[in-house]
Amino acid sequence: MNKSFIRIISALVIFTLSIAPVLTGTAGAFSTDTLLENAPASFLGEDNADESATSIATVGDVNGDGYDDFLIGAHQNGVGAQGQVYLFFGKASGWAADTDLASADASFIGESFNAFAGFSVAAAGNVNGDGYDDILIGAYGDDGEGIGVNTGQTYLILGKESGWTPDTNLSTANASFIGEAAGDESGYSVCSAGDVNNDGFDDILIGARKSDGAGNDRGQTYLILGKDTGWAHDTSLAGADASFIGEADSDESGSCVSPAGDVNNDNYDDFLIGASKNDEVAVDAGQTYLILGRNTDWFMDLSIVTANATFIGEVAGDESGNAVACAGDINGDGYDDFLIGASLNDESGVDAGQVYLIYGKETSWSKLTSLSTVNASFKGENTGDQAGYAVASAGDIDGDGGAEILIGAPKYDDTGTNEGKTYLFFGNSFPNAPTDPQCEAMTNPVGVRDATPEFSWNFSDDDTGESQSAYRILVASTSANLTADTGDLWDSGMVTSISSASISYDGSSLGTTWGKTYYWKVKTWDSSDAEGGYCAEQTFTMQVAPNAPIEPKCEGLANPTALLDLSPEFTWKFSDADNPDNQSAYQILVASTSEILAANNGDVWDSGKVTSVAGGASLPETIVLKRGATYYWKVKTWDNLGAQGPHCAEQTFTLKSFFLPFWAEILVSAVGAAAIGSGIMWFLMRRKLGHIG
């Protein structure tokens, strides 16, 4: 079933915004369910079936009078549906309800039958740097000066102080751009791209959703760089400065194009290309492509797979990318944000629709990002609403420094059928990232003992009266996983709760690896169900093993060289970064060589693991040591949680060698009391006989 439909609107209605002073933070006397008939101004199409307001756009100040101006497209206007576009200049007063579009300050009529001029209209920015804003008008049904049906043509009208007239034929436009082949439908979507190459001239995008490229209906988007002169009528899009061809047949990339603002804050404007029929993840799930601005390296016929980032619909039939738009800087972080509509998403009902908000950032853009993982989303109220068929920035209408966004749901039913509804969300209405995130009541703690540690944070929101309604915690094994919003150890999911303290870990086992570091972050929702961003990366490190014992000594000395005691005492001090851990056991190795000790072999003595809190032990008297020999030793400890630390560095001790006189040698060699007595008698006799002096 073809789920698309034609947008039919019979009148444009303008509400003049009455903004209260910035300090009040209010936005005038607005209320819900306001009847459009009460608008201060409205504009009626000239004839039956004109379908005026199929497209509308503010276009900046085209005549330099200090007031912004706007366009209204009526693509079915004219006997042969040539289409017509109406330009109204801004002014301080004189607006009226039911104004006939015939009274516009200027209008522009399509060149050929079924040109459908005005199906798309847009601001072009200031493409020639003359200080006047310029205008784009798409006529996707134009025959391209005889190329063929639905070749399509896009018209550029340069701003000027005067000389604007009604019923101007678009053949007199300052420049025009013709599709490459019949059936391309170039001009189906048009927009300013901003200044993508930072040369001081605004640039423009033209979508040709039916361009075949290297296949069938892949779609192609053309980039035309601004310049001060050299604009010409009937310019073939084959001569554009760059183009991007859809990935696969029937993708219809370029069915929607939009500036993105400067999403990475590098002073180059960026842009978006929607391909709502893309099948990357599933049939017609859709895909949106982000192209980052740059100084050079723009080329024709680039595959759109060269985009810097892409965003794919959640499920088949979503048609994500049917609408895309710059949102401005919603969260006030200095990066522009953007919107992606998926008007046929079924999450809150068949074709209820959903809109996704992606925050700008400096780096870490990636391809094939699922829209299920983006920063925020807005789901349609009811089955069939098709919320997200149109999305736009509303600027900063309440003066609080944050941009507002608009979401259109054209099939919304209120008191009848398909009246449609437009939603306004105020910038800065999203919670800030949580503040003071802690694990076990500490910031990035080391030595966490609990296998289910507790997390806490403070909810933060600039909007008065808001409070937390839900949270989501991610815990990852690596920083890279956390950066990718992957909680491979624990993803709590969205938990409805006002609690922001003592939230216990409930994920995979954290294991028994002493000293392992884990990574976590948390985000919150406010009481209006607005979703905030994650806090910065946090860490916690599990219980660490003891350090190597410090101050190892033998007989109270470091590496003594003349020990007399053949059963020396070893001492040390327990060391552990985890306070208040203490020693629960030790092991001492004594070896005959340094090499043996290095192999963790105590060939002289291996105490084994000895359960003890004492920081000392003596060599057993059963161990026979050699006088004059050097021995090598080391010790390691366990803490009271059973964590084993490393050995201390190699230590040594050397026994004293004895060099005795002759008489002492006899004493030492005598065995037993009788032998000693006999030795004495023999010594005295020898002395008396004069044999000993």
Image: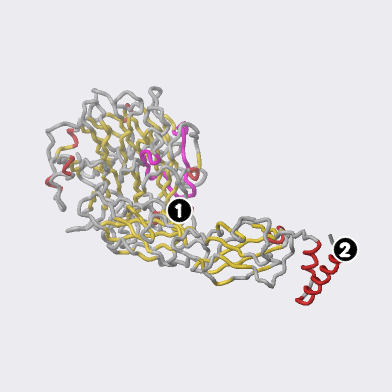
Is 670 left or right of 208, judged from the image as shown? right
Identify the image quadrant of residue 654: bottom right
Residue at numbered disc 1: 484
Q: Amino acid at mark 1?
A: Ala
Is 487 left or right of 599, judged from the image as shown? left
Is residue 148 something that shows in the picture? yes
Residue at image x 70%, y 63%?
A: 591
Residue 177, percent from left and from top: 40, 32
Residue at image x 21%, y 40%?
A: 399
| Magenta stretch, residue numbers | 237-264
Residue 483, percent from left and from top: 45, 52
Identify the image quadrant of residue 154: top left
For the C terminus, give its image quadrant.
bottom right
**Distance (Cα) linking label 1 and label 2:** 98 Å
Is 301 left or right of 70, judged from the image as shown? right
- Circle 2: element type: loop
Residue at image x 56%, y 62%?
A: 645
- Circle 1: element type: loop
For the N terminus, give its image quadrant.
bottom left
Is residue 141 something that shows in the picture? no
| N-terminal label among 1 and 2 | 1
> Residue 569 magenta-drawn?
no
Q: Nearer the viewer, residue 213 or 41?
A: 41
- In the image, residue 415 sits, relative to residue 71, either above or below, namely below
Q: Amino acid at mark 2?
A: His
Query: Disc 1 vs disc 2: which is toward the camera?
Result: 2
Instruction: For label 1, count other residues whose C-alpha is less than 10 Å away and answer few (under 14), some (14-19) or many (20+).
Output: some
Residue 598, percent from left and from top: 68, 59
Q: Which label sits on residue 123?
A: none
> Residue 260 magenta-drawn?
yes
Q: Which label sits on residue 691?
A: 2
